[in-house]
Image (tube, rainbow, N blue to C red):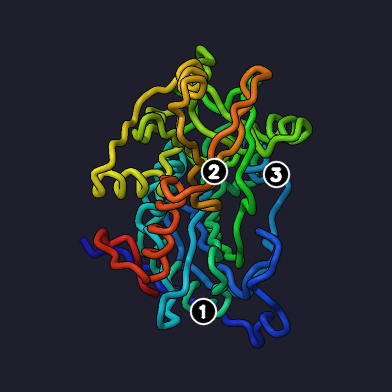
Amino acid sequence: MATQTYPIEIKPVSESRLRGLDINNVPFGRLFSDHMLVATYDEGSWNPATILPYGKLEMSPSISALHYGQAVFEGMKAYKGPAGEALLFRPQANFERINRSAARLCMPPIPEEIFLDGLRELVRLDANWIPTRPGSALYIRPIYFATDESIGLRPSQEYILAIICCPVGAYYAEPVKLTVTREYVRAFPGGTGAAKAAGNYAASLLADRLAKQQGYDNVLWLDGVDQTYIEECGTMNVFFVIDGVVITPPLGGTILPGITRDSIITLLKEQGRPVEERRIALTEILAAHKQGRLQEAFGAGTAATIAQIETIAIDGVELNLEVTGEGQYGARLLKHLDEIKTGKREDHHGWMMEV
């Protein structure tokens, strides 16, 4: 049986919008590159993708995604290498994760040829949009959502995959301050916590707003059953360093399997650093801080890469953490990852894909 192929139609812009723009100094996620990729699914199969000028999509107010939340997305980045080449960090992992998210929301899988080949072609066309300032990148946002014009509650029969790009700098300019929430939870066993589903992020916004009103940057999420164990921080995976051991909560259906998280664990193990994936209770963090054994904490995700945590508020008690110093794990890991992503350090893992 012949394998289906998916040719990509390209409709380039007549003139780039880059003229007169300083892409090294733009607000995060507000300015988008010249092109976008769009592919559709209907009648049980995928249609060839099109790369066209960035613009609006025409949709009916009855599409399923707006009513029942069948929508997943990804976050990934492209960088400039030493010779000016465009480099993608672990795109295969993003492809695999978006399809795991899609499966959880009863959505058909995206063909690898559409996702990866389309992604490469899109970044090739918009390579001049990749900023070169240290800590910056071209952020890439694939979004996959249901488009049936029906308000009947069932899995959609039609879908759109779109990929858009925007130049970005640092997500967090300073170390972050977190507060524990007891009123809200991010995920619970059997839910969609391990999927990068749009609804997960909508459900986090109120807790995030309340945290900001109290003077914090975001929330430290606890488990949804006992509200005892730490799971994530804001939209990032979280790491703690206690007595020289790096500890991060285990995956298990309630935590997003972060690609940056996986990369950090891989690097630590290669360096012979002790690292544990295990449950970590708030009481353990409080005790370790009181005893002077909690050395640092940091969040990890695509947008921020690694963000040092300087404050954790737990039931009215603020724990202040070290965020600078030569021995900081987070700072060393951030430097190591940035050097791999920009081609300044040899990639032993096959993580980078040149466009």
Which quadrant of the rendered structure holds the N terminus? bottom left
Which residue is most to the bottom?
14
Amino acid type at image mark 2: Val
Q: Earlier in the sequence, mark 2 or mark 3?
A: 3
Q: Nearer the viewer, residue 21 or 158?
A: 21
Vertical comparison of 55 with 71: above or below: below
Can you tell which quarter of the image residue 269 is in? top left
Image coords of residue 12 (percent x, y): 58, 82
Residue lying at 50% horizontally and 14% vertically, measured from the top left:
225
Q: Nearer the viewer, residue 320 or 153?
A: 320
Residue on which the image places disc 3: 62
Query: Element type at marker 1?
Result: helix
Residue lying at 49% horizontally and 54% vertically, measured from the top left:
42
Vertical comparison of 144 with 273: above or below: below
Bin the neighbour count of mark 3 within 10 Å (Cα to Cα): few under 14, some 14-19, many 20 and up: some
Residue on which the image places disc 2: 323
Bin the neighbour count of mark 1 within 10 Å (Cα to Cα): few under 14, some 14-19, many 20 and up: some
Q: Which mark is residue 125?
A: 1
